[in-house]
Image (spheres, helix red, strand yellow):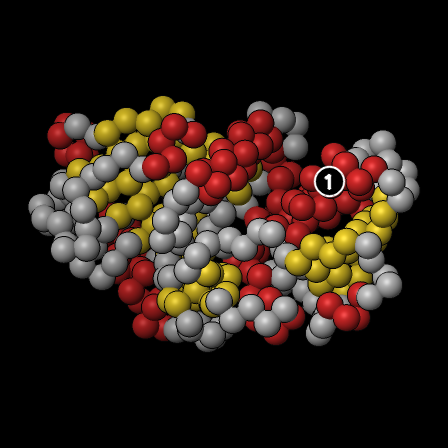
Amino acid sequence: MSSLADTYRITIIGAGIIGLTTACTLLKEYAANENLQLTIISEKFTPETTGDTSGGFWEPYGFKNIDERILRWAAYTYDIFVSEFFSTKAARAGVMKLALYRLRGFNGQNKDDIKAIEKPKYVGLVRHFRLLDQHELGMFDHLKPTSGYAVSSVAVEVIKYLPQLQRFLSEDGRVKFIKKKIHSLIELKDKADVVINCSGLASRHLVGDQTVRPARGQIIRVYAPWIKSVYEVDSEEGLGYVIPQSDTVVLGGTFQLDDWNTNIDENDTRKILRICAKAFPALEQIRHGKVEVGLRPYRDNGVRLE
C-alpha cells in the first residue's frame, strides 16, 4: 500500500464496524500524507448499522474453519481492545475487559453435536485461559455441564464504539461522510482511485457476490446488574449467551442462516429467555427488555479480502 503515500482518493463503502475501523487504520497509516482524501459512503450510519444491535463480545464466531488468517485478525483486534480498555477513552468507547465462562454439555451429558471440551483455537491469543475443574463446575451444578473453561476477554458496546470512531474520523479534515445508497461501483468511476467495499450483505447486489448470506441475530437487552461476567451455555435448545454491558445485559441469541426477517420473532424471544434463565433463574422475573434484530453478513468460505 506504499503507493497511497501519493495523492489518492479513497472511498470506503459502508459505515459499520469494518468500514470505520478500515478508515481509522488508513488515517493512522498515512498520518503524514496531507493529500489523502478519504470518503465514507453509506446508506446507514450508527445507530442504524448491524453492529449497533450486536452483543459486541470478542470471539472468532460464525466460521466453519478458523485458519491462521482469521487468528491473525482476531489477535490484532483483541490487542487493540485491551489497550483501549487501559486508555482514557475506555468509558466513552464502551470497551470492557471481562471473564468468559464457557460451559459445555447440560444435564450431565453432551448432545451428539457437542464435543467434549477442547481448547479453542484462539487460546494462544488471550490471557488467563484455564479449564474448569470439577470444583469450579460445581458452581453451575443447576446446569450440570460436563466441562468448561474460563478466559479473560473483552466486550465492546458498539452503540458507543461506532460514534467514537466517527468522532475521531470527523476531526480529520481529509475525511468526509456521505449518506447515500450505492447501487453500482460504476457510480464511483472517476471519483475514486481506490474503492474498499465494506458493505456487508449489500455486496450481493453491489458486486454480485451471492456467496454472502444473512445470519439473522436476535438479542434482548435487560437490566440485570448482578451479572458481571460473560457466560456461554449449552442447552437442549441450542447455545445461549449472557454479555454484561455498562447499563444493560445482552441475552442471546440466534444464528439463523438465510433468514432475511428483521422483525422481532416472539418465539425467539421466549427461547432466549428460557435458555438464559436456566443459567440465571432471576432472569425469569424480567418483564421489560429491549429486543433487537440484525442480519450478520456470513460466507461459508469466510471473509473475502482481496
Q: Tag 1: residue type?
A: Met
Question: Which x, y percent locates residue 61?
Answer: 40, 49
Residue extending furthest toward the left: 108
Q: Residue at x 72, y 72 (%)?
A: 184
Q: Nearer the viewer, residue 298 or 169?
A: 298
Q: Residue at x 86, y 61 (%)?
A: 191
Q: Is residue 96 visible?
A: no
**In x, y percent, where is residue 200?**
58, 61
In which quarter of the view is residue 239 placed?
bottom left
Label count reads 1
Secondary structure under the numbered disc 1 in the rendered image: loop
Is residue 42 found left or right of 201 in the rendered image?
Answer: right
Q: Residue at x 14, y 34 (%)?
A: 138
Rendering quarter of residue 141: top left
**91 on left or right of 268:** right
Q: Position of residue 8 (x, y in %)?
A: 85, 47
Q: Quadrant of the N terminus?
A: top right
> Is residue 192 something that shows in the picture?
yes
> Left or right: 31 with respect to 182?
right
Residue denoted by label 1: 1
Q: Position of residue 38 (x, y in %)?
A: 81, 50
Disc 1: CA contacts within 10 A as few (<14), some (14-19) or many (>=20): few
Question: Which residue is pictured at 14% across the width and 54% down the height?
Answer: 111
Residue sitting nearer the eye, 226 or 271: 271
